[in-house]
Amino acid sequence: MTTIIIAVLGAIMIAAAVLAIVQKSLLSAVIAAGAISLLASLLYIVLAAPDVAMTEAAIGSGLTTIVFLFALNKIRKEDKHG
Amino acid sequence: MVKKIFIVIILGFFAVMLLPLAKDFTPFQELSPVAEKYVEDGPEELGSANLVTSVIVTYRGLDTLGEVAVLFIAAAGVGFFLRKEEKGDKTPKRGSSQILQSGTAFLFPLILAFGVYIFLHGHLTPGGGFQGGVVIASGMVLLLLSSASAKINENVLHLVESLSGASYVAIGILGLVLATGFLDNRFLDLGEFGTLLSAGAIPLIYSFIGLKVGAELVGIVNNMQKDQS
Amino acid sequence: MTLITILGLVLIMIGLWGMLTQKNIIKIIIGFSIMDTGVHLIMVSIGYLKDRTAPIIDSAVDQANAVNTVVDPIPSALVLTAIVIGLAVTALMLSYAIKLYEKKGTLDINEFKELKW
């Protein structure tokens, strides 16, 4: 059972990682990178490390994505001003 | 073209280098001697139910101090690169939706309370200073997103950060003077195992770490978000 | 869990591939964060022991027999701090990227050829 969970999550993570690299749109790439972290936090639960899972869920998929989005926002704003 | 060949060669080297790790890796059957000592003596010695916490705060406390220092330097670097240049024409920000505003008004105190709960219970349940600090920081992000005029008072932020950092080191030195070593938590009473006020100074130290990490992450996000033009 | 170790290795390779092939600086930073996740997964998976539970002494774990029932707490502690550092380093890299964009008006890594001979 655990093996199936790991295999499914791992397949999604690898797909998301490839998507994050080849994706043309930066926004989609950032979201895909956040999804990888979220799935990784599920794997940490499987690995019996709840502390790490909490950190990864809050930082990896939460704050990192937000920091990326703020950076994209800044770059786009500069774009508009010329 | 040459570049592509180089990339293939580099990736190939990396794959060959990493392959033995996957192929010959045999999972351990029992704990390593160091971990065994931590698991065996940790609860008795330090009174912390969460062994990860006892490793982070006490056994490897000096590493954590260094790690918080690295975090501080990175936050200072972000602040340095994105420092505000005073310019005239400020485009007024668009306000956020009613749903986000009312949701924030309701959720913000709860998120703060949850963050504080996480770092106060770091020695009993999964979680601790780092996670609690991050939860507090995400509450602040919600506040920044919800209202266009919301500004974080940077003086308060710096005050919280410096005070908690200084208290962290002070408690460490207190452990050196009153107990057996730097960041030793046993200068306070260990208390009853498994209750909130137990494990000596661990809740105190973790609270300061939580406040410091929270203040630093809020500073990073605030700098990234701040209008420059 | 050997499967997770292999997954971490694959993520490292994908991240490295992204860092080497992409032109956009933001994409390079995304590749770095994928690599980060891979390294963390490997470290935690090395500390895992089969059929054991989280290193927290409570009603589910007998304190006297803890050595035989919990996983290694040290990799967890290391990775926990590494994740927080990872966020700070990512933010630092992004602020560099923003600064570079302000100077050049582009994020294409090939446009920055001051050091090219």
Image (tube, grey):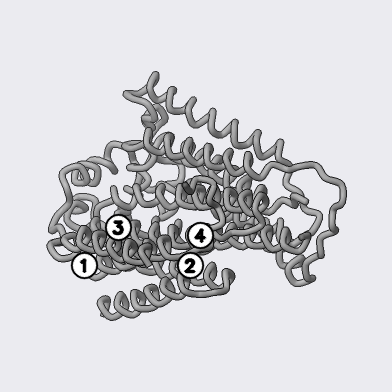
Kind of residue sitting beneath label 4: Ala
Task: Check residue C2 in the rendering and tell me which mark sits there, or answer none.
Answer: 1
Foreground disc of the pair 3, 2: 2
- The residue carrying mark 4 is A58
Circles 1 and 3 on the same chain: yes
Q: Which chain carries label 3?
A: C
Which residue is at 54% across, 67% downward?
Answer: A30
- Where does the image place residue B76, in percent across and percent down from the top left? 58, 38
Q: Mark 4 lies on which chain?
A: A
- Where does the image place residue B204, in percent across and percent down from the top left? 49, 37
Kind of residue sitting beneath label 3: Val
Foreground disc of the pair 1, 4: 1
CA separation, marks 1 and 4? Answer: 26 Å
Q: Is mark 2 on a helix, strand or loop?
A: helix
- The residue carrying mark 2 is A33
For the residue carrying disc 1, how many other residues have a C-alpha within 10 Å: few (<14), some (14-19), or many (20+)?
some
CA separation, marks 4 and 2? Answer: 14 Å
Circles 3 and 2 on the same chain: no
Disc tally is: 4
Q: What element carries label 4?
A: helix
Q: Which chain carries label 1?
A: C
Left or right position of B36 against A50: left
Which residue is at 43% across, 58% downward?
Answer: C32
Q: Is residue C22 above or below residue B206?
A: below
